Image (cartoon, grey):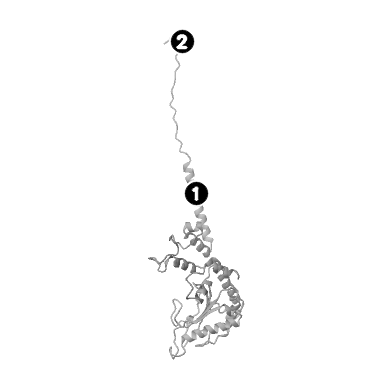
Amino acid sequence: MSKGGDKRPIVIRRKKVVHAHHGGAWKIALADFMTALMAFFLVLWILSIASEEERRGVAEYFSTPLVNAVTGGDRSGSTSAIPGGGPDPTHSDGERARIDSAQRTRPSMQERNFFRNLQQRIERAIERDPELRQLRNQMRFDLTREGLRIQLLDTDQRPMFELGSDQVAPYMRSLLRTIAPLLNELPNELSISGHTDSVPYAGGYRGYSNWELSNDRANASRRELIAGGFDPDQLLRVSGFADRALLPETEPTDPINRRIELVVLFPEIAEAIRNPSVMEPGTASPEASIEALEAATEVPIESTQQDEPQAQAQE
């Protein structure tokens, strides 16, 4: 020990312990997860309140390849670098035929709306007439590849025509004449076809048969439509199918197979009917169809269910 109370300073060394910090990365991950979860439930809620038509539109959007959606290309899903091409292993008529076929069999939302509006106007006109209101369950509306199909179905309790003839029943005449001016509201051309059940005439097919009967009934319907004010220039086709186009899941003798079908045709289908030898499949674009319809005035278009009891067929 040094003299004079000289003391050496005591140095205490303390080891500083640094506690590692976990950082905020977990917070960001949690925030991202909660945002995604909220977006997911928001999408589920929107889909739960959306109509069937809107859900189909969403499904079609997500089935479109991203490159086509961004660039505005066709939505057919083609992976071919050169649209058109010749025959390929999967499609006998080549890539272009597949694209055109998809476009032709998928009516645009605008076309569906035009046809739905027509259906609703027809239904309202029938509902206003107490006599025609009874025929509502003998009508079906659906959208086919050719256009809006309006089926007028027969029953034994309320037949559209006299048994075995083309004589139009009074209420059928009233129905056709009520529909006629409404069909004029669209520029689309009309196809009329007659159908029968499979019960043959006594003379078989050698004399007057279901072929003649179905054609005569289609022509009788044509005359009533024109008498009701339908523009004859919009009529494109009148035909009879006898019993060769029965309704699905029905017996050949079922009375509802005796029917008249009115088809409001898509413009490209009408053009193909007029020029079958020169019209290439799908050459009329969907845009042309829309432009033709926009000069005139779909809940999805649904077929009405026919629940009349079955009874005896025509002799």
Q: Which residue is mark 1?
A: 34
Residue 111 horizontal/vertical position (percent)? 55, 68
Vertical comparison of 158 with 66: above or below:
below
Residue 236 horizontal/vertical position (percent)? 54, 78
Residue occupying the point 58% across, 85% down: 170
Residue occupying the point 47% across, 57% down: 67
For the residue pair 72 and 28, the one nearer the viewer reads as: 72
* Amino acid at dot 1: Met
**Helix, strand or loop under label 1:** helix
**Helix, strand or loop under label 2:** helix
Vertical comparison of 30 with 250: above or below:
above
* Quadrant of the drawing holding the N terminus: top left
Q: Marks 1/2: CA distance? A: 71 Å
Mark 1, Cα crowd under 10 Å, few <14 / some 14-19 / many 20+, is few
* Amino acid at dot 2: Gly
Residue 303 seen: no
Q: Which mark is residue 189?
A: none
For the residue pair 233 and 248, the one nearer the viewer reads as: 233
Residue 218 seen: yes
Q: Residue furthest top?
A: 3
Vertical comparison of 17 with 228: above or below:
above
Q: Which residue is mark 2?
A: 5
Q: Between disc 1 and disc 2, whose residue precedes?
A: 2
For the residue pair 33 and 190, the one nearer the viewer reads as: 190
For the residue pair 59 and 314, the one nearer the viewer reads as: 59
Residue 227 horizontal/vertical position (percent)? 60, 83
